[in-house]
């Protein structure tokens, strides 16, 4: 039986930290489904279609990695995909409380759903999507933390917005 996992997130924007988790997950599972959340409550910079296009370009050569999007509850999306294992990355102790709350709520909403965690690589544990947006907005160099294509798209949006 194929072992699949869903890696959900806002990916606004995708960072090298996300890529690291996805590539490591692809070594542990037969299939990694990246679920781009469309209804993120955060003020998004890239629209969901743009995020999906970026992810598809980045992972086009890895057949084990599938890029999908979902709207509404993650606990319902897993039913649609018939994949009940969720993967989340854990960077710092600050992530823990939020992740614990989310994993527990998701399991209460759908008892088939299990969340597993992968510890972020030490080279990426300081990166967050909001930090990246700040760096670019304030004219800094974020090229070490994000792929080129993400940097280009963010600069277009954030430097235009002023
Ligand atoms: O990249 P993020 O912002 O940490 O990802 C959070 C995400 C998108 C996984 C989470 O907000 C989510 O699952 N959103 C879908 C709506 C939902 O199910 N909310 C209840 C979670 S208990």
Image (spheres, rainbow, N blue to C red):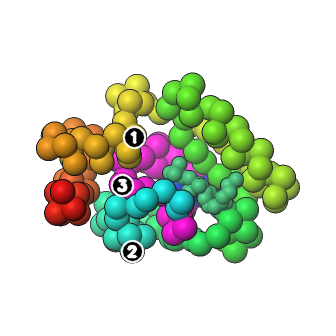
Task: Return the disc, 1 or 2, that comes first in the chain's sequence.
Answer: 2
* Nearer-the-camera pick, 47 or 120: 47
Q: Residues within 10 Å of mark 1 (few under 14, many from 20)?
A: some
Vertical comparison of 31 with 24: above or below: below
Q: Are marks 3 and 1 in contact (CB under 8 Å)?
A: no
Q: Percent position (x, y) of residue 85?
A: 69, 53
Apparent side of residue 83 relative to residue 29 in the rendered image (left or right): right
Per the rendered image, the range of residues in magenta is: 10-39
Q: Tell me the CA gap for discs 3 and 1.
A: 9 Å
Residue depicted at 34% across the width and 61% down the height: 45
Kindly identify which numbered label has been placed on residue 13: 3
Looking at the image, in which quadrant does ligand 1 appear?
bottom right
Kindly identify which numbered label has been placed on residue 46: none
Q: Residues within 10 Å of mark 3 (few under 14, many from 20)?
A: many
Query: Residue 126 appears in which quarter of the rendering?
Result: top left
Kindly identify which numbered label has been placed on residue 128: 1
Apparent side of residue 160 relative to residue 10 in the rendered image (left or right): left
Q: Which residue is mark 2?
A: 49
């Amino acid at each position: 039986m194929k072992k699949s996992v869903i890696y959900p997130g806002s990916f606004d924007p995708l960072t090298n930290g996300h890529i690291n988790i996805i590539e490591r997950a692809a070594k542990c599972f037969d299939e990694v489904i990246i679920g781009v959340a469309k209804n993120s409550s955060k003020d998004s910079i890239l629209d969901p279609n743009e995020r999906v296009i970026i992810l598809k370009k980045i992972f086009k050569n890895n057949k084990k990695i599938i890029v999908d999007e979902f709207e509404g509850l993650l606990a319902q999306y897993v039913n649609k995909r018939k994949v009940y294992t969720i993967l989340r990355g854990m960077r710092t102790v600050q992530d823990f409380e939020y992740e614990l709350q989310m994993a527990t709520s998701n399991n209460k909403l759908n008892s088939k759903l299990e969340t597993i965690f992968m510890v972020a690589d030490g080279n990426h544990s300081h990166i967050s999507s909001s930090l990246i947006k700040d760096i670019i907005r304030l004219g800094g160099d974020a090229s070490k933390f994000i792929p080129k294509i993400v940097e280009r798209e963010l600069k277009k949006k954030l430097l235009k917005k002023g």
